[in-house]
Amino acid sequence: MVSESAISGGADTDIALADGGALPLPWLATPLHQALTQGRSHALLLQGPAGVGQFDLALLLAQAWLCEGRTSTDQPGCGRCASCHLLRSRSHPDFQVLLPEALREPLGFGAMEGEEGTAKASKAKPSREIKIDAVRQMLSFAQVSAARGKAKVVVVYPAEALNTIAANALLKTLEEPAGLLRFVLASAAPQQLLPTIRSRCQPLQMALPSREQALAWLGGRGVDQPEVLLAAVGGRPQEALQWSEEGIAAKTWLELPRRIARGEAVALTDWPVPRAIGAMQRLVHDLMRIAHGAAPAYFPRDALPKLPAVRAALERWAKVLQDAARHADHPLNAGLLMESLVAQGQQAMRPAR
């Protein structure tokens, strides 16, 4: 299943990198160098939290492996050669990306060949899985010699979106790649991958950037009070940027606990249901931390009620939210669901006597 955080992973996918130029996400410098100098396998598995540039790093690796102008194996792509230009225009003949339909357009790759007519004919939502048809196209790609003779690269993102049939179809080629074929799989939930896929990849761990790096990057993109949104998304700067671009300001986030305490469901009516439920889950998490004597993680302490709520009531609200999250993508009535969840939150947030 593709999470909302996965969609935020394509905010800075301009992969052209001039010699000596800055990376689009500065915290990728260390994992990129590690991958280029320590990568020994034909298949790398980038794993770590979503919203920190997994897809960006996968594209940078593809650029480095396909680049015809770099002079050292530990350098990223030059950004000037024909191969780098082809990759930037999404038209490199030796590159393929496996994405769910729901992510192809947000990440700038458009519909797959043979997919556009089907999408127009059907009113169904784009799939959040990587299906067997996409893997079959990749298998055909894998059997052809490299057009430019440098390498062939396949990026799979997010790898946990591979459904079972697609994952099994990928296994054979992943185990015995033909010629110059290389893979980059990126996953925020590697435990959901088939063990046989994980065993065929060299893992590369990614971490959250430092708070200073993330705040500087967000501030450079005009995010107001970036420290508020960065805390709200658990330190994931790309997700914080996405929230800001979609109109969720720091002020909106800071006012949310009090508005829910007043039973104002209208505070969340314009939010996508999965994000609204996620926001309430963060709120109940912080309230439970306070009830246990710990500091909140997602909200500043002064944005939360001064008196602790009853733990049992918070636990009941948390359970209701957990159940609602399972069907967040397809609620029967989003308006009624928000009213119900906010009403239960209002009840749960009443202070203990």
Image (spheres, helix red, strand yellow):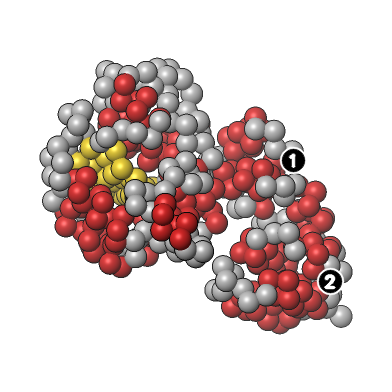
Q: Are dots 2 and 1 in contact, CB under 8 Å? A: no
Q: Residue at x 31, y 55 (%)?
A: 134
Q: Is residue 168 above or below residue 212?
A: below
Badge 1, how many Cα within 10 Å: few under 14, some, many 20+? some
- Report the disc number at residue 225: 1
**Among the 4 quarters of the image, the one containing residue 337:** bottom right
Q: Residue at x 48, y 44 (%)?
A: 107
Residue 245, percent from left and from top = 67, 43
Q: Amino acid at mark 2?
A: Gly
Would residue 294 be found to the left or right of residue 52 on screen? right
Residue 307, percent from left and from top = 84, 69
Separation of disc 2 and disc 1 at Cα? 26 Å
Q: Secondary structure at mark 1?
A: loop
Badge 2, how many Cα within 10 Å: few under 14, some, many 20+? some
- Report the disc number at residue 263: 2
Q: Is residue 125 above or below residue 253?
A: below
Mark toward the start of the polypeptide (2 vs 1) = 1
Q: Residue at x 31, y 29 (%)?
A: 64
Q: Quadrant of the C terminus?
A: bottom right
Q: Secondary structure at mark 2?
A: loop
Is residue 156 or residue 130 the one in the foreground?
A: 130
Q: Amino acid at mark 1?
A: Gln
